[in-house]
Image (cartoon, grey):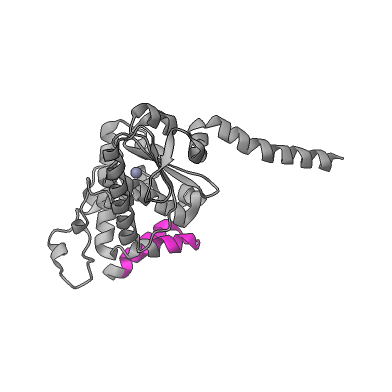
């Protein structure tokens, strides 16, 4: 009898919890139903991109171009593209706030535990750098899954990596020539600054709250520290090290161990 009650309560919870989860987050429900929204239409000539009906032809053409540039940049950086996020472009702030809680920044991403993901672009988000940045977050999510990203990936790495395809902050020339022990390459004459000289410690930038929880200056310094560390690491391991690292983590390796091991293997230390 008691077992039956427990079973029924468990089943009820299994049904009610996801419904409650959806009801609590209206932006999520809007994302899930984007294909049925009368205010948005699929962007012709692309896949999985929705644009607000109010967007002008110029904005539409720009978006098409920026999506292609950003997706190509992701494929080049990662070796291939696994992410399948749906992009939603809201040219007006009011609409952006309907999809992205708080309406801050040029874009935001929503990844769901069962694998679906949405990238929402605001009025300032129709830009190849913004789209590539958000797609890079999504690529990590697609390769590792929601749980592993939450549990294993420090925020400084997630943001630092996204900044490497976001050319507003860093150009690939900063890290694109891999360094090898005993060999001097042109990139080595001006290597990215060593992380030891940074103002913020990476150990203080592990969680989303650590990273974004302070004021504007805190977040900017956090971005600087994250970009500096990842650019430094990439200048040692090369971009081929990125999928090697994520493959190792996907197979159960500890992030920090795999990250440092790749670096040591290259420097021979
Ligand atoms: Zn980011």
**Residue 88: image x %, image y %?**
40, 40
Span of residues in magenta: 245-265
Q: Is residue 109 above or below residue 183?
A: above
Q: Give the side of residue 191 with respect to residue 83, left or right.
A: left
Q: Is residue 10 above or below residue 138?
A: above
Q: Using the rendered view, name the quadrant where residue 11 is placed.
A: top right
**Residue 269: image x %, image y %?**
29, 68
Q: Give the side of residue 72 with respect to residue 115, left or right.
A: left
Q: In this view of the protein, which residue sits in the foreground, 198 or 43?
A: 43
Q: How many numbered tags mark residues here?
A: 0
Outermost residue to the right: 1
Residue sitting at 55 percent across and 48 percent down? 114
Q: In this view of the protein, which residue sits in the foreground, 229 or 132?
A: 132
Q: Is residue 97 above or below residue 136?
A: above
- The answer to whether any part of residue 40 appears in the image is yes
Outermost residue to the top: 94
Q: Using the rendered view, name the quadrant where residue 215 is placed.
A: top left
Q: Quadrant of the N terminus?
A: top right
Q: Is residue 210 above or below residue 150?
A: above
Is 249 magenta? The answer is yes
Q: In this view of the protein, which residue sits in the foreground, 239 or 220?
A: 239
Q: Majority secondary structure of the magenta segment?
A: helix
Is 205 magenta? The answer is no
Residue sitting at 36 percent across and 46 percent down? 134
Outermost residue to the bottom: 182
- The answer to whether any part of residue 202 appears in the image is no
**Residue 199: image x %, image y %?**
24, 42
Q: Give the side of residue 137 with respect to residue 127, left or right.
A: right
Q: In this view of the protein, which residue sits in the foreground, 179 or 107?
A: 107
Q: Which quadrant does ligand 1 occupy?
A: top left
**Residue 232: image x %, image y %?**
25, 57
């Amino acid at each position: 009898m008691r077992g039956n009650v427990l079973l029924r309560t468990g089943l009820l919870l299994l049904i009610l919890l996801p419904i409650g989860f959806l009801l609590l987050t209206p932006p999520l429900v809007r994302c899930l139903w984007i294909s049925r929204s009368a205010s948005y239409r699929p962007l012709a000539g692309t896949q999985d991109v929705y644009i607000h009906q109010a967007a002008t032809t110029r904005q539409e053409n720009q978006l098409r171009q920026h999506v292609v540039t950003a997706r190509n940049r992701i494929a080049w950086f990662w070796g291939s593209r696994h992410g399948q996020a749906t992009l939603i472009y809201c040219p007006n702030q009011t609409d952006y706030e309907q999809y992205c809680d708080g309406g801050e920044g040029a874009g935001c991403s929503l990844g769901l535990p069962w694998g679906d993901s949405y990238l929402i672009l605001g009025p300032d988000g129709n830009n190849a750098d913004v789209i590539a940045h958000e797609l890079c977050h999504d690529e990590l999510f697609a390769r590792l899954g929601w749980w592993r990203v939450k549990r294993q990936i420090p925020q400084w790495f997630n943001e630092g990596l996204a900044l490497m395809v976001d050319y507003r902050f860093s150009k690939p020339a900063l890290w694109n020539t891999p360094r090898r022990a005993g060999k001097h390459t042109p990139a080595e004459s001006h290597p990215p600054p060593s992380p030891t000289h940074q103002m913020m410690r990476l150990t203080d930038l592990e969680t989303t709250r650590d990273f974004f929880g302070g004021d504007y200056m805190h977040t900017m310094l956090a971005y600087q520290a994250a970009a500096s560390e990842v650019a430094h690491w990439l200048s040692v391991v090369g971009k081929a090290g990125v999928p090697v690292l994520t493959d190792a983590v996907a197979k159960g390796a500890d992030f920090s161990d795999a990250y440092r091991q790749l670096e040591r293997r290259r420097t021979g230390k």
